[in-house]
Image (tube, coloured by chain):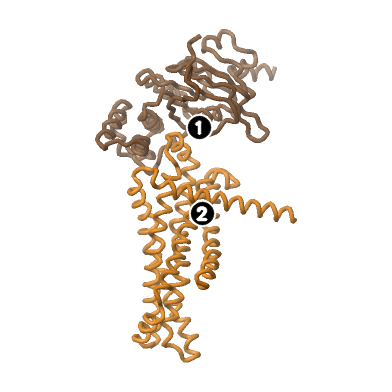
Chain colours: A orange, B brown
Amino acid sequence: MIGRIGRKGISFVSELGELTLFSTSSLGSLLKGRHMLEKLVRAIYEIGVRCVPITLIVGLFTGLVLGLQLYYVLNKFSSESLLGQAVALSIIMEIGPVFTAIMIVGQAGSALSAEIGIQRNAEQVDALKTMQINPLGFLVSPRLYAALICFPILTAFFDIVGIFGGHLTGVSMLGVDGGAYWNRIYESVSLRNVRDGFIKSLAFGLITTAICAFQGYFTHTKASVPGARGVSQTTTRAVVLSSIAILASDYLLTSFLLEK
Amino acid sequence: MKSSNLKIRGLSKRFDDLVVLDAIDLDIPLDSHTTVIGKSGIGKSVLLKCLSGLLTADSGEVSLDGAPGKFPQCAYMFQQNALFDSQTVWENIALPLSEKERISNKDLAQRVNSLVEQLDLENAVDKYPAEISGGMKKRVALARALITNPEIILFDEPTTGLDPERKFAVFDMIRSYRERFGFTVIMVSHDVPEVFRITDQVAWLDGGKFKFWGTPEELNQSPPSELEGFLNPKLSSQSSVA
């Protein structure tokens, strides 16, 4: 039993090391490759533009629900006027970065993992190596940088739409004073709160994209079965691990950022 | 015997306890066609991967005659072609140049178009790999391999899964383009004796060693007794039944 836990622990640490090396090598490969701007624009389209609709929809509904829930909680203390502050801070500091990251992982991260996995199975990664093209620079690096650009922007979209969603429920439907809603947000949300939210989204972007690309890139060694089922296995694992990593790193980052 | 140019010396590769290549030696004349034959899973593809750098050999060296440490430029033809399915045929062929060399768009277009013309791919340049035939895919993969003017092209079982007619078509294609472009072919193949029509020399890999190396004629005249079963599986199975 202890031996098994030990082996699992060693395997986890070893995989974490491999992931770190993979991420740093990929980040360092950007300047070595050619036509990187074109690849970056394409990756921004895949990760960023294509995720805008889902981010806006989820952001709106999250704001609507949050406005509703917080209204009834605050109503018990006759503090409905604090609704704007409560909605804005919850979204900007926590829900925005976390939900946005989970949405992007579901849409773009899974696609990234499956695409690289299929390329690995079709020997396209090996083909790049035989052509002396760095596969990390060609396949992974543009996606990592695109994630660093797209995650904060999509998080900002989520935040804005979410706050409007809270306004829609609180002010338009439940009768909270509109001036109080916006004024509380203006008074309570500081630049530091916004910065902390963006720090989180940057971290989530890097971690989740690295995990998804890593699982796809090593699908031939990570999956217990080869072929399409192997790709399906590593894609599922990429999404699950990314989601766990988002929540775990959110806790660590929150502890660190709140202490500062 | 021809003068040897590419020297493989003491090349070894093992996976855990399984010895796949056991200190093999082979001389391959440049501008020739060498075919490595042997049973499935015996290590033929591993040899190609070691030559191409996809796998690192545990020991041994591959070098050019008189130029230790220097290895000629190689291209690799994969069994399933390994074309990028989200890129057009033109982009696939241009890939090695556009990604590796500082070359103007005009020169790139010139080199790609020249190959497209020589390999009869004019009608396919704007298509995606999924939209063209298997034979055409092979030609696209060959064009992509040829775009960097390699001295050696490694073919990993280029006729896997093809019917006899298409097999001959692929072999003829390799022969005719080799004659036209003058590259060296190192091929792994199961297609015995069909492949003997186009190869200059045959190397039989078995048990991690080359058990035979010579011309197809030499092989036909005096095949090693261990190789007879491989060359004539029907005879072998008949004798075992008898």
Q: Can see residue B42? A: no
Residue where numbered disc 1 is placed: B53
Q: Residue furthest left?
A: B106
Looking at the rendered structure, the kind of residue marked 2 is Ile
- Compare residues B7 and A96 and report the one nearer the observer: B7
Residue A20 place in picture, x, y as percent: 53, 52
Q: Secondary structure at mark 2?
A: helix
Label 1 resides on the chain identified as B
Crowd band around label 1 with a 10 angstrom C-alpha radius: few (<14), some (14–19), many (20+): some
Vertical placement of residue A141 versus A256, above or below: above
At 61% from the left and 53% from the top, the residue drawn is: A13
Say which of marks 2 and 1 sits in front: 1
- Compare residues A106 and A201 and report the one nearer the observer: A201
Vertical placement of residue A52 versus B173, above or below: below
The reply to whether dot 2 and dot 1 touch (C-beta < 8 Å) is no
Crowd band around label 2 with a 10 angstrom C-alpha radius: few (<14), some (14–19), many (20+): many
Mark 2–mark 1 distance (CA, rounded to whole Å):
27 Å
Vertical placement of residue B217 versus A162, above or below: above
Q: Quadrant of residue B46?
A: top right
Label 2 resides on the chain identified as A
At 30% from the left and 39% from the top, the residue drawn is: B126
Q: Quadrant of residue A146?
A: bottom left
Residue A247 place in picture, x, y as percent: 53, 65
Residue where numbered disc 2 is placed: A211
Residue A77 place in picture, x, y as percent: 49, 90
Looking at the rendered structure, the kind of residue marked 1 is Gly
